[in-house]
Image (cartoon, rainbow, N blue to C red):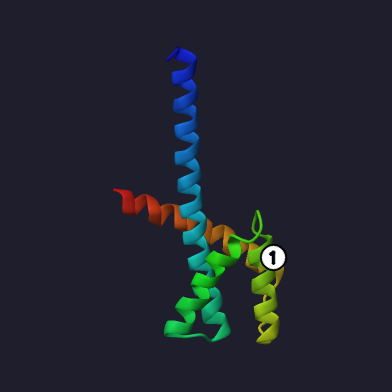
Amino acid sequence: MTTFDNREKAAEGAFAAHESVEFAVRAKRDLLVGQWAANLLGLKDKDAAAYAKSLVSTDLEKHGEVDVIDKLKQDFKAKGVSVSADIIKSTMAQKLADAREQLKAAQK
């Protein structure tokens, strides 16, 4: 195996590790956002947990956050909860930062 092959394998490994971490961070973010939304929607206990988990599945449907944002907007509208797209996006950004911190703390 040449030096180039070794570097290529190392780069592929680093990329795979990064993608794995990013997937875990997004999944954690979606759970946190789901808990926030469930509270606003008046969901409790098992229903709240199921709703939060449903956002993780929703995020796998399309690339990016659009699918999660759309689901949240639809669910809020259906329940008569007034939350703007800007609030949803800002909450998602904050929960992303929270997810990173929580996962980092869990690795220590």
Residue 67 position, x and y percent, is: 67, 64
Q: Quadrant of the N terminus?
A: top left
Q: Is residue 79 left or right of residue 33?
A: right
Count residues near mark 1 (Cα–Cα under 10 Å), then give few for <14, some for 14-19, many for 20+: few
Q: Quadrant of residue 75?
A: bottom right
Question: Which residue position holds label 1?
Answer: 86
Instruction: Tell me: residue 98, above or below residue 4.
Output: below
For the point 46% across and 58% down, the residue is 98
The residue furthest top is 2
For the point 46% across and 60% down, the residue is 28
The residue furthest front is 1
Q: Quadrant of residue 37?
A: bottom right
For the point 69% across and 65% down, the residue is 86
The residue furthest left is 108
At label 1, the amino acid type is Asp
Residue 62 position, x and y percent, is: 66, 58
Is residue 74 in view?
A: yes
For the point 65% across and 54% down, the residue is 64
Instruction: Tell me: residue 57, above or below residue 39.
Output: above
Residue 79 position, x and y percent, is: 65, 87
